[in-house]
Amino acid sequence: MTVDWAHVFAGRVGGMTASEIRELLKLIDRPEIISFAGGIPDPDFFPTAAIARAYEKIFQSNTGAGGALQYSISEGFTPLREWICAYMGRLGVEVGLDGVLVTSGSQQALEFVGKLLIGPGDKVVVTRPTYLGALQAFSPYEPTYVSVPMDEEGPELAALEAALAEKPKFFYLVPDFQNPNGTTVSLARREAILDLCVKAGVPIVEDTAYSELRYEGETIPCIAALDAARNGGHLSHVIYCGTFSKTMVPAFRIGWVNAAPEVINRLVLMKQAGDLHCSTINQIVLHDIVSSIFETHVKHLRAQYKERRDAMLAALAEFAPPGVTWTKPEGGMFVWLELPEGVNGTALLERAIKEANVAFVPGSAFHADRSGQNTLRLSFSVTKPERIREGVRRLCNLLKTG
Amino acid sequence: MTVDWAHVFAGRVGGMTASEIRELLKLIDRPEIISFAGGIPDPDFFPTAAIARAYEKIFQSNTGAGGALQYSISEGFTPLREWICAYMGRLGVEVGLDGVLVTSGSQQALEFVGKLLIGPGDKVVVTRPTYLGALQAFSPYEPTYVSVPMDEEGPELAALEAALAEKPKFFYLVPDFQNPNGTTVSLARREAILDLCVKAGVPIVEDTAYSELRYEGETIPCIAALDAARNGGHLSHVIYCGTFSKTMVPAFRIGWVNAAPEVINRLVLMKQAGDLHCSTINQIVLHDIVSSIFETHVKHLRAQYKERRDAMLAALAEFAPPGVTWTKPEGGMFVWLELPEGVNGTALLERAIKEANVAFVPGSAFHADRSGQNTLRLSFSVTKPERIREGVRRLCNLLKTG
């Protein structure tokens, strides 16, 4: 008897779908394409010299290499966790070593949150739009999504309150320069969100992937800090997900999660069962570089990416036809376009690649309810300013002739 | 309202338990302890010089470092997957790039297999004893285990046939020098297992973590090769899990899984949703070293570990009191002791650490049904021959005075 795999797969496999972004990335790897698609950092900005020195130190040491290449504890490399605790302290959150787990990027933290909290049919509240990778992480655990619309200050409170009344397992939110729409949640809105979630007894999963990349305006406290301020400095309602992929390098696959110790305790078991631990040597090298260059390197990144954001916003102001609106993000990597009703982003992408050699991600991918057909995500992170201007010009020409 | 976390956790969290091995490892990190507990490779044998050179090459290249530090595809680094395909070809399995996924060690492959195949209450067949890490990977998906007893040739066929009649999702097996009991499944038994599983339409999950570490006797074809021989060279019933943790280094967290493309296709989506991809730079470095030193390095490891296995078997023959029996593994890292009925391995461990400064893992941890109270797993992998002799002497003295 042959194996009838489709029949053998567990029910949750129906929730697994390919990322439109990642499938697209395979198609647009031609030099003539100006791509605003991938939300990835520019490799020209990687702190390569510092990383090379950190590796050298390990292999020149008489004792270091063996430990760096061996198995290690599931919780994560202790000096790196100590660095993370100190970092969180600067953000206003007191975290001990029992409140931090090192994960394979924040993507794994989201995967673990799904595995920890979601049973089949459980409600999960997300924003509309929301981060596609979070939907991919959660969906195999078979939730029902409740989407909360956003205005320029963040998720709309009346809709959030109605969503929380459905007794969801958690509310997932990217408060700073959200992927995909670049929106930052205002301080007043953060406090109000926390009020509502505390009242409803619903945890907040706060994804801060882009928070360090602010190009203008004042830093707004993370929701974790607001939660801690109400709880003697400690996390109560918030599960905080951080990453080094945007500030340092993605290839190490190192992020982290902070939460109440009773939550971290379970997540450590999940890490142990899931892949034992993150790469030991990667954690050691990352700890070396964040200890020495974190602040200066992030400052450098802010200056570099600000130029690109400015170039994209200027080009849109110069070239966009009437009826097209866009967000003005204070940081991050993304500008969000809303096209006139009836224009389909996916159809536009096909034309854009063929006729204009320009690429982006259609916005519908970022909607749990598959709405947002007339929206686009443009990333400015890997394209030099003059190419950004040319790409936006081409895209806007296409919109005019559409 | 505070968050009542225990109430918010999904049902599957009940299946997550701490590894007794890993919890123990935290306690025995004192120099006076002779530890036979952890099944980890000896860092003295790591190919450190080759690894250091591979990193240097990346950072001395004008083009390499950016790509090595960037995001990469979920399937895994293509040259590494090509190396794996060639390696599998030498084992008698034809695999294309669409039949291989690079995972964070074979632990993640097991986790993914659980996520892919197990729904709550589904039956999963394992051997008695079986690998603890596999139980940890599968249990969060809430299976019911059916344990098949083993004799010196492997799982007992009548019991396996009865287990397969319960329509399990898969049969999990470590065919070579199994962790924990060191047993190798004979060729005749492998063919018979495949016959039964093909007849029942039940997939075999073959975990080959130790297969390269054979110290005597002829290599026996993997079950994947037997499956492929019946299917024009291709995998049909077998999901094959491999790892570089035992042959190269564990810290990179690089293993792989081979299966029919329709299975790999789903596992790639799982990887994308779970942690995007394995560390790019780790895959590049690993590909460099396996391309140049795999065969010579594994040959070196075999000679080194053989000395330690021999030392342990000789010491047991010299010191073990009557009533104690043990396996004679042809490879791997483990010898399995059976004590007289009524002796409790966990109680013995407490005494062994306190009274004899020697450690091991009680065998009951490796039983899905928690039987095997009178069994112990001894690892000889990280201890020098003279210390092995001394540790076995101390342990056997304790058994005599018990």
Image (tube, coloured by chain):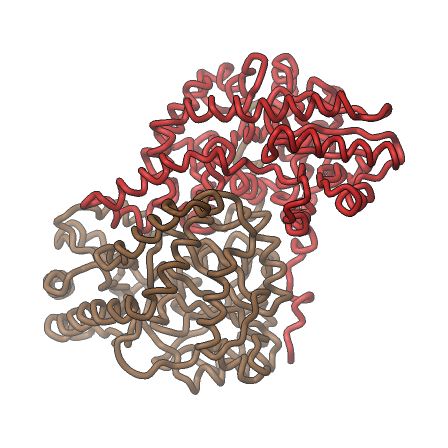
Chain colours: A brown, B red
Give x and y (percent) for residue A135.
Answer: 45, 59
The residue that appears at 13% across and 52% down in the rendered structure is: A355
Q: Is residue B137 above or below residue B211?
A: below
The residue that appears at 86% across and 36% down in the rendered structure is: B343
In this rendered view, identify the residue nearer to me: B368 or B215.
B215
Locate the C terminus of chain A and report the quarter of the image it occupies.
bottom left
Question: Seen in the image, is A294 located left or right of residue B16?
Answer: left
List the single residue furthest toward the bottom.
Answer: A188
Q: How many marks?
A: 0
Give x and y (percent) for residue B227.
Answer: 53, 19
Question: Seen in the image, is A329 located left or right of residue B131?
Answer: left
Residue A262 visible in this rendered orientation of the protein: yes
Name which quarter of the figure residue A231 lies in.
Answer: bottom right
Q: Is residue A230 above or below residue B358?
A: below
Residue A121 visible in this rendered orientation of the protein: no
Give x and y (percent) for residue A58.
Answer: 39, 48
Give x and y (percent) for residue B350.
Answer: 79, 46
